[in-house]
Image: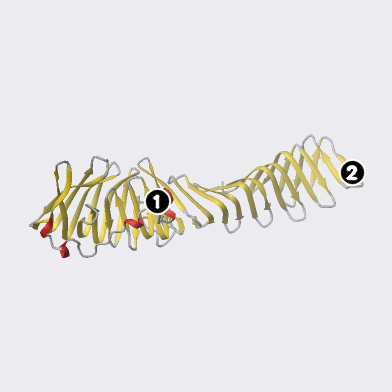
């Protein structure tokens, strides 16, 4: 190693060398060049302590720091104060404390650690990073920002594979996604993000920057005008489609929608279409004991300004609808309408309180309908097969995605 500086003070007994007016150190063995305003060399420890505009250059990386300790025996650099590490592949690390093994390409960063790579920013209380394998781990107050797809994922712990462009977040994992100027907050026991096409199970695919986000177990999401729950969920950035699997349920206003699987298509950042396949069932509470219901093999919904406005049920469609009348200023149920036909169209509008509710029900293609006075409506006909009111699972506010309250 060779040190060049204007003035150097060397203590023969302590075996320390100090410069305070700028210096440059070149290591041919490590292929490093380091510059700083001040430096201290401890010969006994074979270590340097640099401060003031510290800059360490290597063909594979550039390290900029306020204070840096470098051990020549091990090749480990320790940082104290604001530090930035820029890799040859353009990935960047920011931290205020940590160490980097320049020979093994292993590192640990703390105090506001952030790793920026391939359109993603990972931050946490601390980050471990293996440069050779491309594996990084973040612990405590973890946040992953996908600037390309405008997504934010939060959690207690994250694992990131730079080579496969895959990340996993656990521990109160939460995804925040903008939809129509509003935020959707989603929780699952674990959240997995991959580049579409990089994983054989990825939906969509084809676009280099598109991502696939999957949530597993205990999935719930909350948006001011739409909530949902299921066992697993996938969001494919390639086609802007949300897929819900295993006992999915979706709430919009007063309506509850269930089926074997549910898909929500987004367009221009807004909810656009709803597709329910297999045992499609829509229900809303008419009063404390009666429920309006529509069933079909499939159900298609149409959104307007993020609100569900039209629903079309097809394939062996049936409905139970409780007709109301207002008398002396009091609204009450006066009868029950049942119908069977190949297609049922439901129009939804807001009531006087602003809540969405069924406005009209249209029966298409040879309906077989019966209107019963409520007093004579058969009890056996008031609930269609498969009806299950799941309002207890509904997230009423953002925090409920981690577990619906029982109070």
Where is the C terminus found, in terms of image quarters?
bottom left
Left or right of 194 on screen, residue 78 = right
**Mark 2 = which residue?**
11
Q: Which residue sits furthest front?
A: 328
The picture quadrant where one finds residue 386 is bottom left
Q: Which of disc 1 and disc 2 is earlier in sequence?
A: 2
- Res. 205 in view: no
In x, y percent, where is residue 223? 37, 47
> In which quadrant of the rendered view does residue 370 lie?
bottom left
Judging depth in this view, the residue of 336 and 26 nearest the camera is: 336
Viewer-side residue, 307 vs 6: 307
Q: Residue at x 75, y 42 (%)?
A: 50
Q: Position of residue 161 (x, y in %)?
A: 53, 57
Q: Residue at x 60, y 55 (%)?
A: 129
Crowd rating for badge 1 (residues with CA inside 10 Å; few <14, some 14–19, many 20+):
few
Task: Give the label on residue 276, or none.
Answer: none
The x, y position of residue 101, in whole percent, is 68, 54
Within 10 Å of disc 2 (Cα), the crowding (few <14, some 14-19, many 20+) is few
Q: Residue furthest right?
A: 13
364 relative position to 69: left or right: left
Q: Nearer the viewer, residue 166 or 373?
A: 373
Where is residue 46 shown, x and y percent of the image? 81, 52
Q: Is residue 35 left or right of residue 398?
A: right
Figure label count: 2
The image's mark for residue 207 is 1
Task: Indicate the secondary structure of the residue bearing disc 2.
Answer: strand
């Amino acid at each position: 190693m060779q040190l060049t500086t204007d003035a150097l003070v060397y203590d023969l007994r302590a075996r320390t060398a100090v410069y305070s007016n700028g210096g440059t150190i070149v290591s041919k063995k490590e292929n490093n060049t380091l510059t700083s305003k001040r430096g201290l060399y401890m010969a006994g420890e074979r270590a340097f302590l640099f401060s003031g505009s510290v800059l360490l250059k290597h063909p594979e990386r550039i390290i900029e720091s306020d204070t840096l300790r470098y051990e020549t025996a091990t090749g480990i650099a320790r940082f104290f104060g604001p530090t930035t590490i820029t890799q040859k592949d353009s990935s960047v690390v920011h931290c205020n404390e940590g160490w980097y093994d320049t020979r093994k390409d292993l590192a640990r960063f703390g105090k506001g650690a952030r790793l920026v790579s391939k359109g993603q920013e990972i931050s946490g209380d601390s980050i471990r990073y293996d440069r050779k394998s491309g594996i990084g781990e973040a612990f405590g107050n973890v946040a992953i920002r996908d600037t390309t797809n405008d997504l934010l994922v939060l959690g207690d712990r994250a694992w990131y594979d730079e080579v496969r462009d895959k990340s996993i977040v656990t521990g109160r994992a939460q995804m925040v996604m903008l939809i129509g100027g509003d935020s959707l907050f989603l929780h699952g026991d674990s959240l997995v993000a991959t580049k579409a096409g990089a994983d054989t199970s990825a939906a969509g695919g084809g676009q280099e920057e598109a991502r696939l986000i999957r949530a597993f177990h205990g999935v719930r999401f909350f948006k001011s005008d739409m909530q949902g729950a299921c066992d697993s969920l996938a969001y494919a950035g390639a086609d802007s489609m949300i897929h819900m699997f295993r006992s999915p349920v979706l709430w919009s206003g007063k309506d509850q929608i269930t089926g074997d699987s549910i898909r929500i298509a987004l367009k221009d950042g807004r909810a656009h279409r709803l597709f329910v396949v297999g045992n499609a069932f829509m229900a809303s509470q008419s009063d404390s004991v009666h429920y309006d219901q529509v069933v079909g093999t499939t159900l298609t919904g149409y959104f307007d300004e993020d609100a569900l406005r039209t629903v079309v049920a097809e394939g062996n469609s049936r409905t139970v609808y409780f007709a109301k009348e207002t008398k002396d200023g009091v609204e009450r149920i006066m009868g029950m309408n049942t119908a069977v036909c190949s297609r049922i169209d439901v129009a939804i509008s807001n009531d006087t309180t602003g809540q969405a509710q069924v406005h009209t029900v249209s029966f298409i293609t040879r309906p077989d309908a019966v209107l019963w006075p409520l007093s004579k409506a058969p009890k056996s006909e008031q609930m269609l097969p498969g009806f299950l009111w799941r309002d207890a699972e509904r997230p009423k506010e953002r925090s409920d995605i981690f577990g619906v309250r029982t109070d």
